[in-house]
Image: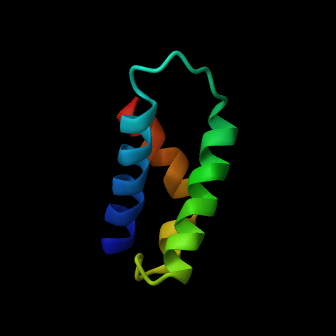
């Protein structure tokens, strides 16, 4: 469950930074960037599980927040 929480938290923080700005981004671009960010966080040991980097989980969390 921790890997899901990490993914949802990073996705939520990303959406928080994008809200209120007049920016239009494609979902694929956001998923790719969050995926890269999670991989970097895993390499720095900020995220304990590599399963947090799955693009499917990122897409799912984006759809749930929207």
Q: Point out residue 47 in the picture as x, y percentages from the top left corner.
A: 41, 76
Judge by depth and name the residue closer to the eye, 15 or 53.
15
Q: Quadrant of residue 49?
A: bottom left
The scheme the figure's colours follow is: rainbow
Outermost residue toward the top in this view:
22
Residue at image coords 56%, 82%: 43
Note whether residue 35 is visible.
yes
Q: Point out residue 45 in the picture as x, y percentages from the top left corner.
A: 45, 84
Tag count: 0
Note whether residue 1 is visible.
no
User: Quadrant where the C terminus lies?
Assistant: top left
Q: Is residue 5 above or below residue 20?
A: below
Residue at image coords 48%, 46%: 60
Residue at image coords 40%, 77%: 46
Residue at image coords 57%, 64%: 54
Q: Is residue 52 above or below residue 48?
A: above
Q: Is residue 52 above or below residue 20?
A: below
User: Quadrant where the N terminus lies?
Assistant: bottom left
Instruction: Name the side, left or right, on which 34 lies relative to 20.
Output: right
Q: Point out residue 61 in the picture as x, y percentages from the top left corner.
A: 43, 46
Q: Is residue 64 above or below residue 22?
A: below
Instruction: Name the side, left or right, on which 1 lies relative to 46.
Output: left
Q: Point out residue 9 in the picture as x, y percentages from the top left corner.
A: 34, 55
């Amino acid at each position: 469950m921790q890997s899901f929480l990490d993914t949802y938290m990073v996705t939520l923080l990303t959406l928080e930074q994008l809200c209120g700005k007049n920016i239009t981004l494609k979902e694929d671009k956001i998923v790719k960037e969050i995926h890269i960010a999670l991989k970097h966080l895993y390499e720095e040991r900020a995220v304990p599980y590599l399963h947090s980097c799955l693009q499917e989980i990122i897409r799912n969390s984006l759809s749930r927040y929207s």
